[in-house]
Image (cartoon, helix red, strand yellow):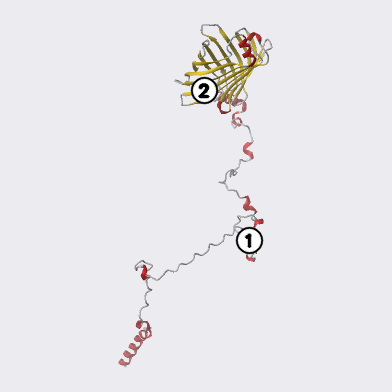
Amino acid sequence: MMRVAVLAGAMVAATPLAAQDHSAHGKKPAAQSEMDHCAMGHLPPEKCPPKIEQEPSPEPEIDHCAMGHLPPGQCPPSERNDDDAPMAGMDHGSHAAMTDKAAPGAAAEDATPPRALEGPRYAADAVWGREAMAPARTQLARENGGMTTGTILVERLEARIATDGGEDGYVWDAQAWYGGDINRFVLKTEGEGEFGGALEDAEIQALYSRAIGPFFDLQAGVRLDLEPDSLTHLVVGLQGLAPYMVHLDGALFLSDRGDLTARVEAEYDQKITQRLILQPRIEAGFAAQDIPEREIGAGITTIEPGLRLRYEILREFAPYIGIEYEAKLGETADIARANRRDPDGVKAVIGLRAWF
């Protein structure tokens, strides 16, 4: 019995080993794929088969209609798939309402609510009251451009040397003002004469100046002529800065004798360096009628173009040299010739420009 039991146990133990599949043990391993030595450059070109070049596949045509690049009128009708029916029912109108916040001119994301503009103009008035804040605002305006200032400007203080044998002379042209940015009192004076001779012309103007814009002032007042004879004029003028930085000063004069005259001056400062400045300047005079006692004829009476080169040693102090041409025109020139005077001439100038 013992032997039978041992034999039965040995047979049971051997059964799993017999069930294993050993058929693959006798087979050879699969051959490895052949290496392409020609593609790897291991063989010379003559030992490699000729290469077959493949034609590049054509690029797919871009459907601009499907991408929405063209308006519907330029696209052919397309067959719509039933699977797209749910998409056709969607409301795409809201997409057009979406704005690109990065695009120029796009509206701000948070617009100012209307309630922000309600209430008093100044928020402090709601706390302390308008009457209490009014003096503070007045003081603030005075300290930020509303203060009263004064300036003296000597535009020309020069000697004139005749280059054609005429008489040497001198000229002054200055003005001063006192007031604020809007309202000012302006005082002007100019004149000329000959060295060693009599004073030819001298005048003083007292004007009220009112700003009528960012660059121009309207001026009105009186003018008193000291030479060649005492005469009083009413004055209405315009002074300021024209486009291209041209300084203009024009005025109409009505004398107590009823004579109407005008004068226009224009000048431009061309900076060569920060301190060296070239200034072209022109002045013209006009008369509405003949004024025999002053040897003036009707029309354009005089013209004085000139060129001055100044150097600003200080911003307030600038000597200059230059040249100027003086000419009487029209009937005024005829009167000068009748009196045996030269109606025109060129003069070299040397002078000083300063302001305080």
Closer-to-camera residue (187/46): 46
Residue 270: tell me if it is visible.
Answer: yes
Question: Residue 70: image x %, image y %?
Answer: 62, 55
Within the image, what quadrant is residue 298 found in? top right
Say few, some or many: other residues with alpha carbon within 10 Å of mark 2 (under 14 / 14 to 19 / 20 or more): some
Question: Residue 262: image x %, image y %?
Answer: 64, 17
User: At numbered mark 1, what does the secondary structure look like: helix, strand or loop?
Assistant: helix
Q: At x 60% / y 25%, what residue is drawn?
A: 134
Sequence-wise first label, 2 or 1: 1
Residue on which the image places disc 2: 279
Q: At x 62% / y 41%, what residue is drawn?
A: 113
Within the image, what quadrant is residue 12 found in? bottom left
CB-based contact (under 8 Å), mark 2 and mark 1: no
Closer-to-camera residue (339/225): 339
Disc 1 residue type?
Answer: Met
Which residue is situated farthest in the bottom direction here? 1
Q: Which mark is residue 200?
A: none
Horizontally, residue 51 falls left or right of residue 66, namely left
Disc 2 residue type?
Answer: Gln
Q: Decide: is 230 above or below 214.
A: above
User: At numbered mark 2, what does the secondary structure look like: helix, strand or loop?
Assistant: strand
Question: Residue 150: image x %, image y %?
Answer: 54, 18
Which quarter of the image is occupied by the N terminus?
bottom left
Between the residue at mark 2 and the residue at mark 1, the CA separation in whole angstroms equals 75 Å
Q: How many marks?
A: 2
Q: Decide: is 72 above or below 143.
A: below
Q: At x 63% / y 51%, what residue is drawn?
A: 96
Q: Decide: is 312 above or below 35.
A: above
Question: Residue 103: image x %, image y %?
Answer: 57, 46
Residue on which the image places disc 1: 87
